[in-house]
Image: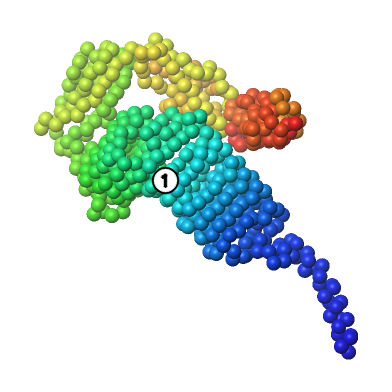
């Protein structure tokens, strides 16, 4: 009987072995804490303090080490190409060494790893995802010239003290370095084409957008460069040393949370050029009084925060957007005795402009010009440009309160030209015309379409294609000079095909791809060509492909409405 039972058990064991072996090879090898599937490390089940990723892993999967509280040190080998979303999020890892094979660090990869103080970056990383190192505590971001993009909030609220932006970075997401209280200086590689550091402050290359002021910078005052038009998202957050900020007259927008938690900031000017102020822009500051002019028409939620007892007194013009905002939000306000619809106007000789005066009290307003040979002003505030020069139009209330508009008069244009005299667009496509006039002249331009069913045009020259057909777009100056552009609208493409889907080129050789739109007769003014790897092969605006180095790259053609076609290029 025992012999029969023994034989039966043996048979059962033999029958079960293949299934068990198959399961183990597909998911996890015996006694290994690494769950690997098709080269992807999908989970770590061990409790070792120091972990070295196996060399057969090519990718660390989503949340593979998330909430691993035992692991304190991780070594990632060169075999790994990517670190997935949330791979180490909310873990207690303290030290990470990233191999030279990694090209992509995913979104939230090390999110909330507050114990992470040491990161060794590989030399092949091209992208750092959104919130990848959010609230981590490493102190230095080295000069990584391979990196092309840094996602939004990538290093937000981290312990960074030193930040170096490499030569290859072309994209930095909003708030990438926001709330980093310990940064005292940004350094940017001199050959970087997109960004620059001036006095340790991070700007785009043209210095029109202030991206991030280093919160630990010791200065108590700061003057924003005259070139800046945009104060970026959370760009001054936690700058506790700042007491005074001077904005230039080119600034048109102040981003969300721009000056949030600048606890000792007492003085800031809002120039008349500003049109928008984002939510929470001045939350948790020491500002007691602030003037917001009439040109600000877009005001975000809770610009002074959520604690009404800390709101400053808002000075604003009667019936302005700021006045309406103050009343709606319960903010203390003081009306300006008088303010004007414009504080500066440029006109061509013969042109007119109507000014409106807004007064805190009802009563008569009188208007005067400082130079009637340059410009006159009627009793109702209409300016007429008379001769080249500058004059000041002054509006005065009955109790002698005044407001001034500076008028600059230039020559009337002798002609006007458009950058294009003909355009072909796909239905639904848009394009903006530029009208130029001779140097030293000025005008008010008006735009019109001869057939708005075919295409419309905005006050800034933006054309929108509506339906198949032809129309004439006309720009006209105040003194009657005109220029025209013929716009032809055709069907939008439904698909696109390239002349080749595969190309093999020797290094240094070229080939030109051609794109054909369908249906026949379809149009797309916007035609973009891109390469997935410009180190292997690059492509110009005409589809000319140039082989750079051995490897494979994908060339993509794209229409205005997102239709694409691809060609795989192999370089030998």
Q: Residue at x 35, y 44 (%)?
A: 216
Residue at screen point 63% across, 61% down: 43
Q: Which residue in the protein does label 1 denote?
A: 161
Q: Nearer the viewer, residue 552 or 447?
A: 552
What residue is drawn where x is 54% and y is 27%?
454
243 displayed left or right of 451:
left
Q: Residue furthest bottom?
A: 1
* Colouring scheme applied when the structure was drawn: rainbow
454 vs 266: above or below: above
Q: Position of residue 182 (x, y in %)?
A: 38, 47
Percent from the top left, x then y, of residue 540? 63, 26
Label 1 crowd (10 A; few <14 / some 14-19 / many >=20)? many
Above-or-below relation of 110 to 45: above
As drawn, 301 above or below 222: below
Foreground pick, 2 / 444: 2
For residue 321, say whether it is visible.
no
Residue 567 spot, x, y in % from top left: 71, 34
**On-image quarter of the C terminus:** top right
- SS under mark 1: loop
- On screen, residue 35 versus residue 459, left or right, reads right
């Amino acid at each position: 009987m025992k012999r029969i039972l023994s034989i039966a058990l043996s048979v059962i064991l033999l029958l079960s072995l293949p299934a068990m072996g198959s399961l183990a090879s597909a998911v996890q090898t015996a006694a290994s804490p690494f769950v690997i599937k098709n080269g992807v490390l999908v989970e770590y089940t061990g409790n070792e303090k120091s972990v070295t990723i196996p060399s057969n892993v090519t990718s660390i999967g989503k949340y593979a080490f998330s909430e691993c509280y035992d692991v304190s040190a991780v070594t990632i080998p060169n075999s790994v190409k990517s670190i997935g979303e949330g791979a180490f999020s909310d873990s207690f890892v303290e030290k990470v060494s990233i191999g030279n094979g990694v090209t992509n660090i995913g979104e939230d990869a090390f999110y909330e790893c507050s114990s992470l103080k040491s990161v060794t970056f590989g030399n092949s990383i091209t992208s750092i995802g959104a919130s990848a190192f959010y609230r981590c505590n490493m102190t230095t971001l080295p000069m990584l010239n391979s990196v092309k993009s840094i996602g939004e909030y990538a290093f937000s609220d981290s312990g960074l003290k030193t930040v170096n932006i490499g030569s290859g970075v072309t994209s930095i997401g909003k708030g990438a370095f926001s709330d980093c209280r310990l940064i005292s200086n940004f350094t940017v590689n001199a050959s970087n084409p997109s960004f620059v550091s001036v006095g340790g402050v991070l700007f785009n290359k043209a210095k029109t957008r202030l991206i991030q002021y280093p919160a630990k910078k010791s200065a108590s005052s700061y003057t924003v460069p005259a070139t800046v038009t945009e104060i970026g998202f959370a760009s001054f957050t936690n700058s506790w040393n700042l007491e005074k900020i001077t904005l230039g007259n080119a600034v048109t927008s102040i981003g969300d949370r721009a000056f949030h938690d600048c606890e000792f900031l007492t003085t800031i000017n809002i120039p008349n050029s500003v049109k928008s102020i984002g939510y929470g822009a001045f939350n948790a500051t020491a500002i007691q009084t602030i003037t917001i002019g009439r040109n600000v028409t877009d005001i975000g939620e809770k610009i002074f925060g959520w604690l009404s007892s800390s709101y400053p007194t808002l000075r604003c013009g009667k019936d302005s957007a700021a006045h309406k905002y103050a009343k709606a939000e319960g903010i203390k306000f003081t009306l300006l005795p008088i303010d004007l619809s414009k504080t500066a106007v440029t006109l061509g000789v013969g042109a007119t402009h109507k000014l409106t005066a807004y007064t805190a009290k009802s009563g008569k307003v009188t208007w005067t010009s400082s130079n009637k040979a340059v410009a006159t002003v009627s009793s109702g505030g209409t300016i007429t440009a008379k001769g080249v020069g500058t004059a000041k139009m002054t509006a005065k209330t009955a109790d002698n309160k005044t407001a001034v508009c500076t008028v600059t008069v230039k020559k009337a244009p002798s002609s006007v030209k458009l950058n294009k005299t003909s355009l072909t667009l796909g239905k639904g496509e848009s394009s903006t015309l530029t009208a130029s006039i001779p140097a030293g002249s000025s005008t008010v331009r008006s735009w019109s379409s001869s057939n708005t069913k075919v295409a419309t045009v905005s006050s800034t020259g933006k054309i929108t294609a509506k339906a198949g057909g032809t129309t004439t777009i006309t720009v006209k100056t105040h003194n009657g000079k005109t220029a025209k552009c013929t716009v032809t609208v055709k069907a939008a493409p439904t698909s696109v095909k390239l002349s080749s889907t595969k190309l093999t080129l020797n290094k240094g050789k070229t080939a030109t791809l051609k794109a054909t739109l369908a249906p026949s007769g379809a149009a797309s003014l916007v035609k973009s060509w891109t390469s997935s790897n410009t180190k292997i092969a690059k492509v110009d605006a005409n589809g000319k492909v140039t082989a750079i180095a051995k490897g494979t790259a994908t060339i993509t053609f794209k229409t205005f409405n997102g239709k694409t076609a691809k060609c795989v290029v192999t370089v030998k």
